[in-house]
Image (cartoon, rainbow, N blue to C red):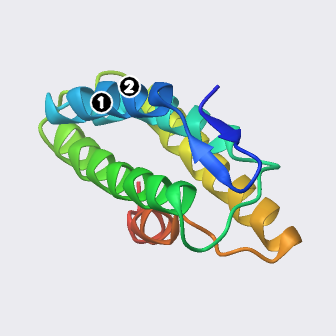
Amino acid sequence: MLFYFDGAELTPTSALYDILAHVRALYGAGMGLTSFGVLATVIRTSLGLRWTSFGAAAEAFALIDGDICQAIQSSKEEIDAGRAGDIESAHAKVADLRSALNESADAVSHWGGDFPFECAAASLDVWKF
């Protein structure tokens, strides 16, 4: 469980921060593409949740947004350096992350919230891979 409702607001758990530490280790080691699957799963756990624009959940989503942007940059470098391995697999990982972001944008628009991954979505939009 990455989030729980404490009766007043949506709250991130320590498990979320543990996963984000793992993601940071991956993209920090030049394995951004590998981190995409983990990040897509984190994004999908937020589907169906509602949160306020301010508070612990919003702050956690801002961190996740930044981590996705860093993972994208790491992935670009990984691909440019020829370390991505199978290019079709790389395309599939990018497509899965893009899909998770789109699913989140759709879900949040249904309840009128603020999409928390704007920077990540914009970064993927300008990356023509």
Quick one: SS at disc 2?
A: helix
To which residue does mark 1 refer?
Answer: 21
To which residue does mark 2 refer?
Answer: 18
Count of number-bearing discs: 2
Q: Amino acid at mark 2?
A: Asp
**Quarter of the rendering occupied by the C terminus:** bottom left
Query: Please, which residue is most extreme toward the front here?
Result: 7
109 over 56 or under it: above or below = below
37 over 70 or under it: above or below = above
| Percent position of residue 90, x then y | 42, 33
Residue 4 placement: quadrant: top right
Residue 45 vs residue 105, the one in the foreground: 45
**Quarter of the rendering occupied by the N terminus:** top right
| Percent position of residue 123, x then y | 39, 66
Which residue is drawn at the image coordinates 45% and 60% (left, top)?
59
Q: Residues within 10 Å of mark 1 (few under 14, many from 20)?
A: few
